[in-house]
Image (tube, rainbow, N blue to C red):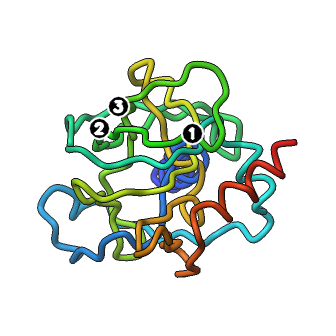
Amino acid sequence: MRKFKNVITVFCIVSIVSIFAFWGISKLPKTNASNRNIIMSLSQDASYTEDNLVRDSVLIVRATAKNIKEKVSKAITSKNSDGKEVTVKLPYVVYNFEVNDYIKKDGDAFKKIEVVVPDVVFDETQINFTEGKEYILYLYKAKAFSKNSYALTTYSSDIYEAADNDNFKNIANYDVVKYDELKNKVKEKIK
């Protein structure tokens, strides 16, 4: 039982810290065949501020979802609360995106990027990007994947989806912002 609790603890920690994602892009039933056995509940870390989000993202882009490149499973090794290493194998979906604009970039700037998201259900919600839809994404480098692969910085406030008239809606809190206003706000935080 203790080993199971350690695996679950590490899985949650690894998911929050290194798996990247969102909140509410698409509601899916718990019985989705590809992920029905991985059901989790996460709460947002209230201490994770907008400043931290901008600071911790190596790439912030306005990009269009193209298609699903592949579904893969990768093993992630992390330490549990007792300091013991635990390896957990997680399923991922790798999406192809075309970058329309760079709001923040550190290092290489690829026109076509891959966005890696866990293929799991969080609070009855799963990340599913819609082909042809435009998003603003806060990303960090997904080192276990290709050189142009990135992951979402948090599971809450780092995804905006296109609304109308150059507006974007945050999928976590449903705030609507003009693209230029959001871009300028991020640029101010980078200075």
Q: Label 1, secondary structure: give it.
A: strand
Q: Residue extending furthest right? A: 191
| Side (left or right) of 106 relative to 162 | right
User: In front of the other: label 3 or label 1?
Assistant: 1
Residue type, label 2: Asn
Image quarter for residue 144?
A: top left
Asked whether disc 3 touches disc 1, contact meaning CB atoms under 8 Å apart, the reply is: no
Residue 16: give x, y in percent of width and height. Answer: 57, 53
Q: Which residue is mark 1?
A: 102
Residue plotted at (30% across, 52% down): 119
Residue plotted at (21% across, 64% down): 36
Residue plotted at (59% across, 55% down): 154
Residue type, label 3: Lys
Residue 5: give x, y in percent of width and height. Answer: 52, 56
Q: CA distance from mark 2 to mark 1?
A: 16 Å
Q: Label 3, secondary structure: give it.
A: strand
Q: Label 2, secondary structure: give it.
A: strand
Dot placed on the residue nearer the N-terminal end, 3 or 1? 3
Q: Which residue is mark 3?
A: 74
Q: Along the line of sight, which residue is nearer the eye, 83 or 172?
A: 172
Q: Residues within 10 Å of mark 1 (few under 14, many from 20)?
A: some
Q: Along the line of sight, which residue is nearer the eye, 129 or 104?
A: 104
Residue 99: give x, y in percent of width and height. Answer: 42, 39
